[in-house]
Image (cartoon, rainbow, N blue to C red):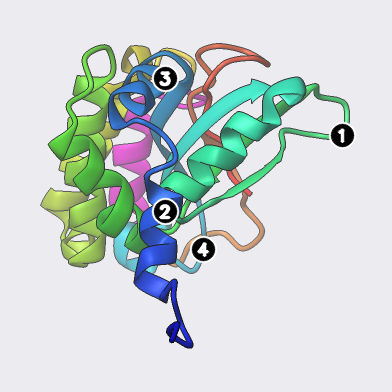
Amino acid sequence: MGSDNPIGADNQQETRLSTLDPGWVVGFVDGEGCFSVSIHKNELARRTGGWHVQPTFQVSQHQDHRDILEELAAFFDCGKVRSKGPASSVDVYVVHSTIQLLERIIPFFESNELRVKRHDFDQFAHIVRAIRSSSHHRPEIFEDIVRRAYSMNARGKQRARSIDEVLLGSSETARKAPQIGSAVKIQSDPHGDMGSQAEML
């Protein structure tokens, strides 16, 4: 007599997570992925001087290959696939949640080491853990996070503001209320439309 639940939830998840070879995933992300940390003004982020820190893992592909991104989403069992924009032919697989980054993305790449993007990943993992522990609210930890973020993705060459502006702004904002309505976004866009750049949603 067959079981009422021949394929349980655990087995279903295992089937989903084993559809791609881990070695292939590492190589694909090394070539097409991006670990990034954007920093933008947010008047509500008072404990970090008016700056919000957002780690993002994403992989970009032409929309003709969206199925590959869907497979990655199933492999990691988190994140979402969306269009890069209404006028773009690029789709992106994106994970913003720091819980999902900490529980699914980071452990995988610590067990399956990247080569090309190893430095960016190491900084990324450190920053995510600092955010999840709330230690980034301490000024010295926040400064360390900013410096690590600016060391990633070609050392932040295409960021909107210099590291000194962010750190100085953090110190000044910590001493006074932030300006309401400011919405300056800082992020790296190293590869253009088809690249693996970070985006804020």
- Magenta stretch: dominant SS? helix
What is the C-alpha distance between the residues marked 3 and 2?
20 Å
- For label 1, the SS is loop
What is the C-alpha distance between the residues marked 4 and 2?
44 Å
Instruction: Give me the disc on residue 43.
Output: 4
Are there few (<14), some (14-19), or many (20+) residues within 10 Å of tag 4? some
* Residue 199 relative to residue 31: left or right: right
- Which comes before the other along the chain, label 3 or label 4? 3
Q: Is 163 colored magenta in this rendering?
A: yes
Which residue has dot 2 on it? Answer: 15
* Residue 100 relative to residue 144: left or right: right
Q: Is 23 colored magenta in this rendering?
A: no
- Which comes before the other along the chain, label 1 or label 2? 2
The stretch of residues the image draws in magenta is: 159-174
Dot 4 and dot 2 residues touching (CB under 8 Å): no
Which residue has dot 3 on it? Answer: 28
